[in-house]
Amino acid sequence: MATLNLVLMGLPGAGKGTQAQKIVDDFNIVHISTGDIFRSAMKNKTTMGLKAQAFIDKGELVPDEVTDGIVKERLSKDDVNDGYMLDGYPRNLEQADALESISSELKRDVNAVINIHVDPEVLVKRLSGRFICKTCGATYHKIYHLPKVEGTCDVCGGHDFYQRDDDKPETVKNRMNVNVKMNTPLVDFYEEKGLLYTVNGEQYIDKVYKEIKQILSNL
Ligand code: ADP
Ligand code: AMP
């Protein structure tokens, strides 16, 4: 199997983080979530984090020059040698172009794009039930994905969970609008390149993963 350099695409709440956890376990590639990088920077109150926060709180995209810079820096590190999976990036055509340049310069071209497709109306409901482990970032859902032992994270055994500020209904609506607008051109971009694999994300979490695993195993 060739090195896996992947993009995981899907609207907010489509299940990228949930599936990423499983992909990383099975395929041993580095998970790079721009959303996670921003949340960590905001928690640590770095200059970049404070700058990003203003956009994230409104459900807007962080400006491309900031986001592209972060991705370039991350993809330049040695641990990406054996493959990577970008989650939440690119989010618009300008970022997709930037990724073309970055990955080609670093000789780490993307070789597949997994697009998790879910109707936006389903997503608004999903996001209101999302909760996250404070210690390791594992994602759960009040109805669809509870920890095996109540109050205990399956991944790290932690007991503290939180809800993301931007999962509040007012922010979710704007986030969804912003992302829906950008999503179709992005899907078309990767389809034209022959890199796109779309899976139906409105199935059980394990069924979605089974399809993704099948695609990745055949690359
Ligand atoms: P993303 O990273 O794309 O924003 P998440 O992986 O955080 O999405 O998933 C959003 C919410 O939906 C979480 O609460 C998660 O547990 C839940 N979820 C993920 N996949 C599914 C699915 N196939 N069916 C139902 N709920 C799901
Ligand atoms: P996510 O965790 O992917 O849902 O991202 C949370 C928020 O971080 C988004 O609503 C954006 O404000 C910001 N963000 C994450 N990835 C990007 C990106 N590729 N471009 C711009 N903003 C992003």
Image (cartoon, rainbow, N blue to C red):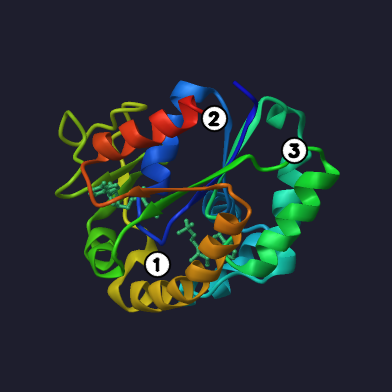
Residue 78 horizontal side relative to residue 185, left or right: right
What type is the residue that disc 1 sits on? Asp
Q: Earlier in the sequence, mark 1 or mark 3?
A: 3
Q: Residues within 10 Å of mark 2 (few under 14, many from 20)?
A: few
x and y percent of residue 157 in the render? 31, 26
SS for tag 1?
helix
Q: Is residue 47 at all visible to an observer of this figure?
A: no
x and y percent of residue 81 in the render? 72, 27
Contact between marks 2 and 1 (CB within 8 A): the answer is no
The residue singled out by tag 1 in the image is 166
x and y percent of residue 106 in the render? 82, 41
Q: CA distance from mark 2 to mark 1?
A: 35 Å
What type is the residue that disc 3 sits on? Arg
Residue 194 horizontal side relative to residue 103, left or right: left
What type is the residue that disc 2 sits on? Leu
Residue farthest right in this picture = 105
Residue 80 horizontal side relative to residue 176, left or right: right
Q: Earlier in the sequence, mark 2 or mark 1?
A: 1
SS for tag 2?
loop
